[in-house]
Image: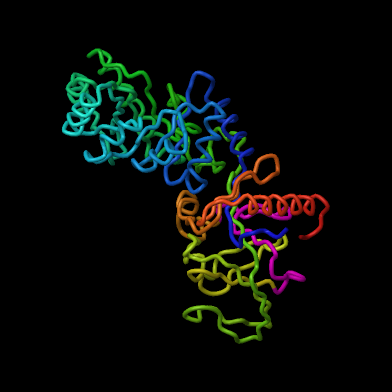
Amino acid sequence: MPMPVSTWVEVDLDRFATNLRALQTLVGDRTRVLLVAKADAYGHGAVEMAHAAEAEGVSYLGVATLHEGLQLRIAGCRLPIVALSPLLPSEIEEALAHDIDPTVGDLEFARLLSAAAHRAGRPARFHVEIDTGMGRIGVREEEAAPFLAEVCALPKLRLASLYTHFPDADSEDTSYTNAQFERFRTVIAQLAELGIQAPIVHAANSAGTVNVGAARLDCVRLGLIAYGVHPPHDRAQPAVAPVMSLRSRVVQVRDLPAGTSISYSRTFVTKRPTRMAIVPVGYGHGYSWLLSNRGEMLVAGRRVPILGRVTMDLTMVDVTDVPDVAVGDEVVLFGEQGGAHITVEEVAAWSETLPYEVMCTIGKRVTRLYRRAGRAVRMTTLVGERPEWTAAADDYLRRRDASATAGVRM
């Protein structure tokens, strides 16, 4: 059976599980893991990643918005969910109703949360971010003691954690992060003197986890590295591998004479007779326009350059030097094929951005295909799921893997 879609993200659940185990080994059994599942788990699919993380013993899930938390609850996720970004006052009651813990950063929100918890007849857990140098949200370190003294005195509120966030832990020089961490520890000690002690204290994001071992504390917040992408200057180098690849298929092959202009604004003109393959991916899928005339893809295990401008729905590549390219051939935008690799870091560099953005901006028009033990286990599309599509994808994967093992091009 043919692959039932032209473009898809392939998510390896076995790799994800292996990554989580390697990271738990790195931080030790006493340190809990909060999986950052915001932005649809960095494009991987929040529901699927949350369920897989729960099966691997992850303790918490982190989201940015109320609806991200609701999506996980509706899908049956049972782990504690922390909203790491501020919620609006109008979202408090629904957050409480679905057991989504807010991060509290001002007294008025805390009072409204207390009142809502009183009406609900049960305590509300909350978290507080101490701003020790991120300069974004939270409570400034010098204001933390009086703020928490007042908030913790409000009825029906239960402090669940105190945390801080590192803006520069992926730098070669961690002196700023080290100083930031010491300031955080000072604030925690000051609060303890006032009798304010959170059950959980955490500081390390992915970069902090691998670069500042002392900052692992009670819990670590793992995002990028859980999905197999190392932060810059990764000192610990845990054995993680990319979970996601982005793949498509050739939809047309054309032979063009020298002197032919390609795509909008005619930014590329062929200098030789050129065989061109059209790939049904563009910036409407989240594949950056900045890849125009500079990015590469894999076809038959060989790197081929992008020709001209990336368009909304289509991108053209030069396959002149790749024999026998045909409609239906698989194309890898990032990932592995035939022993060759294009990394998400490379795509980010060509796009003048970060790996985070490359993964997070892959849109919902791109199918997500989940595999475990070499088999397709789920396929989510814009129009829902159909068992026959998953079965067709499974057949495709098995044939592709068998061809790769035999060294035969599929």
Q: Report the span colored magenta.
A: 320-346
In the picture, residue 156 is in which quadrant? top left
The answer to whether residue 337 is magenta is yes
Question: Residue drawn 57% across and 41% down?
Answer: 228
Q: Which residue is nearer to you in this view: 305 or 282?
A: 282
Q: Position of residue 89 (x, y in %)?
A: 21, 38
User: Outermost residue, right direction?
Assistant: 406
Q: Which residue is nearer to you in this view: 362 or 364?
A: 364
Q: Position of residue 167 (x, y in %)?
A: 37, 40
Total tally of numbered discs in the picture: 0
Question: Residue drawn 66% across and 86% down?
Answer: 257
The answer to whether residue 196 is magenta is no
Query: For this view, does 318 lie left or right of residue 70?
Result: right
Query: For this view, does 18 lie left or right of residue 218?
Result: right
Q: Can the viewer see residue 305?
A: yes
Query: For this view, does 18 lie left or right of residue 322?
Result: left
Query: For this view, does 98 lie left or right of residue 323?
Result: left
Q: Split into 4 quadrants, where in the image is the C terminus?
A: bottom right
Is residue 182 placed above or below 346 in the rendered structure? above
Q: Split into 4 quadrants, where in the image is the N terminus?
A: bottom right
Is residue 169 placed above or below 29 in the rendered structure? below
Q: Position of residue 67 (x, y in %)?
A: 36, 43
Q: Position of residue 334 (x, y in %)?
A: 60, 55
